[in-house]
Image (cartoon, rainbow, N blue to C red):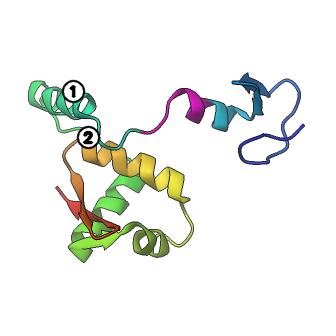
């Protein structure tokens, strides 16, 4: 069986049904928990958590790398950032990692015409 979303081959035991579609586990999780880059509640919780903790939150190696690339560039578009990551992430995973950085106040984004520019927070 193939995933209706990404086309990956899925074992019968690993397939999930969602809104009449057969999905692999990754696409199923994405359907149940869609990405929210601009989520005021998540940003508030991350900031409150940082205030109440003695140590700053730990970033993953990839989050640190993304943040360093953004900081070094000053500002950068998603496509250019993906190029610098040399295929380590796809756009979906970059957006997920960036959303976490944005919620933590470590990075932000702005629009320039029809382009979205990532900036360090």
Q: What residue is shown at x 65% (from left), y 37% (from top)?
A: 26
Horizontal relation, residue 50 to residue 79: left or right: left
Disc 2 packing (10 Å; few <14; some 14–19; many ≥20) = many
Q: Quadrant of the C terminus?
A: bottom left
Q: What residue is shown at x 22% (from left), y 33% (from top)?
A: 40
Q: Is residue 74 visible?
A: yes
Residue position for label 1: 45
- Ranked by sequence position, the earlier of labels 1 and 2 is 1
Residue 42 picture location, percent across and down = 27, 31
Q: What residue is shown at x 48% (from left), y 75% (from top)?
A: 83
Residue 5 picture location, percent across and down = 71, 43
The magenta region covers 29-35
Residue position for label 2: 103
Determine which quarter of the picture holds residue 107.
bottom left
Q: Pick whichever, 54 or 9, lies toward us.
A: 9
Residue 80 picture location, percent across and down = 41, 75
Q: Is residue 4 above or below residue 112?
A: above
Disc 1 packing (10 Å; few <14; some 14–19; many ≥20) = few
């Amino acid at each position: 069986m193939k995933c209706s979303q990404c086309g990956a081959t899925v074992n019968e035991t690993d397939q999930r049904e969602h809104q009449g579609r057969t999905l692999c586990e990754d696409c199923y999780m994405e359907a149940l928990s869609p990405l929210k880059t601009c989520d005021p509640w998540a940003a508030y919780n991350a900031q409150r958590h940082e205030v109440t903790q003695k140590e700053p939150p730990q970033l993953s190696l990839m989050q640190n790398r993304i943040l360093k690339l953004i900081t070094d560039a000053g500002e950068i578009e998603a496509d250019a950032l993906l190029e610098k990551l040399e295929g380590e992430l796809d756009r979906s995973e970059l957006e997920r990692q960036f959303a976490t950085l944005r919620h933590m106040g470590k990075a932000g984004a702005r629009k320039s015409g029809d382009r979205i520019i990532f900036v360090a927070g």
